[in-house]
Amino acid sequence: MQNCKFFDASRIGYTIFVYNSDIHPECEYLLRKDENARLANKRGIEFFGADKDKALFDRN
């Protein structure tokens, strides 16, 4: 939350982007992504969440 206050004070435009293919199980990834989306919506920040490629993750 401290970082959000810094950006708000600086008037720098920013977007929250969430992508991390290393988070497993998938429900944990979705929980984290959804929480970031909720925070972005609450603060009026643009949000973009890229869903991980499950097939690629499982193959590695």
Image: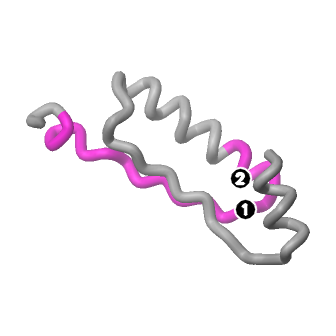
Relative to 53, 17 lies left or right? right
The one of 1 and 54 positioned closer to us in this rendering: 1
Please report contact status of discs 2 and 1: CB closer than 8 Å, yes or no. Answer: yes
Q: Is residue 48 above or below residue 29?
A: below
What residue is disc 1 on? 45
Q: Secondary structure at mark 2?
A: helix
In the drawing, does residue 13 fall left or right of residue 33? right
Residue kind at label 1, given as amino acid type: Ile
10 Å crowding of disc 2: few (<14), some (14-19), many (20+): some
Tell me where residue 38 sits by quadrant.
top right
Q: Residue 2 magenta-drawn?
A: no
Instruction: From this view, report whether residue 13 is shown above or below residue 37.
Output: below
Marked residue nearer the N-terminal end (2 or 1): 2
Which quadrant: the N terminus? top right
Q: Where residue 35 sits: x, y (%)?
A: 64, 37
- Compare residues 18 and 2 and report the one nearer the observer: 2
Disc 1 on helix, strand or loop?
A: loop
From the viewer's perspective, tell me whether residue 22 is left or right of residue 15: left
What's the residue at 44%, 33% (across, down)? 29
Q: Tell me the tag on residue 29.
A: none
Looking at the image, which residue is at 15% across and 39% down? Answer: 55
Q: Is residue 46 magenta?
A: yes
Q: Which mark is residue 40?
A: 2
Task: From the top left corner, tell me how far across and down residue 27 is, in percent.
Answer: 43, 24
**Residue 17 horizontal/vertical position (percent):** 53, 58
Which residue occupies 54% across, 30% down?
31
Toward the left, the furthest residue is 59
Q: Which residues are magenta?
A: 38-57
